[in-house]
Image (spheres, rainbow, N blue to C red):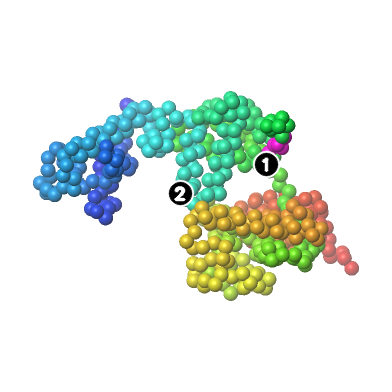
Amino acid sequence: MKPTRPTTGIALDTSHPKADGTLPLKLRVILERKPRYFGISLELRDGSVIESLTLADLFFIKHKTLDKDNPKLTYSDKKIYKEIGLLLADKEKFANEIIYELRDNFTFYSFKDRFTGIKKIGDEDNVFPYFAKKIKELEANNQFGTASSYDLSLKSLKMFIQSVTGKEPEKLYFKDITVSWLRSYESFMIGEKMTLLPDGKVKIKEGLTKTTVGIYLRPLKAIFNMAIEAKEIDPGVYPFGKKRYNIPKGQKVKKALSKEQLKLLFNATAETPEQEKARDFWFFSYTCNGMNIKDICLLCNENMEIDSLSFFRAKTQNTNKDQQPVNVMLTDFAKSIIKKYRNTDNSPKAFVFPILHQNDSGQTKRMKIQAFTRFINQHIKVLAASVGVTSDISTYFARHSFATLAIQSGASMEYVSEALSHSDIKTTRGYFAGFADTTKKEILEGLMDFLAP
């Protein structure tokens, strides 16, 4: 049976009228009785942009006569109507050209990408437009951190290709990303880079770790899966997985402080107000179940109870549909930090700490959270080094220290999993699996504490 070819037409969106009474212009595409609508924007010769019309306007354009039920027209100049009519005909012609090019591979998703200009005809196998589309979607959803990961991944791919070809690439086809291509990419990223300076000296830059290479390649893997799910590429070109290319995994050794180190850091004399503030928020994170700094910044008054906090983790809010709220019991220390730094605005939606503002955009919030995290890391390093604790300390140590000390103190894996808000206990087991050997030994030796005098 011959497959049905999509049909097109110009329509107006009667469900979303504009304030001036006009209706948004749409291209209607119907496939197997299922319609989809795509916005249309027309630029006239005088520079004006038309994105909506009245029903009477469209009736006149189609039939070259007045609608008897709607004699009053928004646009009285017949020349303008003629120009609009020609532009609409061009839009519909363009749509049908795309449908013809796609043929049996037609999907509403692939058509939308072409019609809106995200991808051009002949770009169906080009990886770059997929990255651009995904980054745009993530930014629109205020997932700026994930969008940045995709952007860095894209830049690393272009950098590798440029190192091979000597010029910045415009395209990268899925079929060209083979197992050997990925291995070459990995070798390039972890290898040293030499740059010839103007004075004739050579500057050597260390390569990335395999952990970082893995971070860069995971977005590419996701892009492959997107294209396969949309049926835009053959699953046979997929280069990842068993007996193919395995993305490098990061080392799982967790960074945690011992009880002795925690005591030294807590009692250290802060030389500056900045060091004191950094330590306060570091230990606030630690005592609040290893709470992420982003979640601390996003805490609102409505998340506060007398003795507890209840919130949703920002990290998994967009990926876990069944996400449960995180409940944290507040210690006296945690309460003291809240009292010390609390925002003067007591309204429910106001942030607990004056790090962010309610009117901040998503991008601004992300930048402020990053800046505050850098602030803590910068000053906690100096304070830790002053008392002989590792200068490599960061906010991540607070979360890992909580998990380590909780298990060392006899907490069950289930309790730690719930406290860390892990959706799968396997993730929590990963924390234990990643502990340094000395920590594992201490935990196991703790099982024999009953023998102590």
Q: Name the residue beneath numbered marker 1.
A: 211
Residue for point 65% across, 55% down: 374
Q: Is residue 104 left or right of residue 88?
A: right
The magenta region covers 204-208
State whether residue 409 is above or below residue 149.
below
Q: Residues within 10 Å of mark 1 (few under 14, many from 20)?
A: some
Q: CA distance from mark 2 to mark 1?
A: 28 Å
Residue 68 percent across, percent down from the top left: 10, 46
Disc 2, SS? helix
User: Which residue appears farthest toward the bottom when viewing the image?
Assistant: 306
For badge 1, the amino acid type reads Thr
User: Residue 81 is drawn in which quadrant?
Assistant: top left
For badge 2, the amino acid type reads Ala
- Viewer-nearest residue: 330 or 341: 341
Residue for point 50% across, 54% down: 362
Disc 1, SS? helix
As for residue 69 lying within the magenta part, the answer is: no
Q: Name the residue beneath numbered marker 2.
A: 140
Disc with the residue nearer the chain's start (2 vs 1): 2
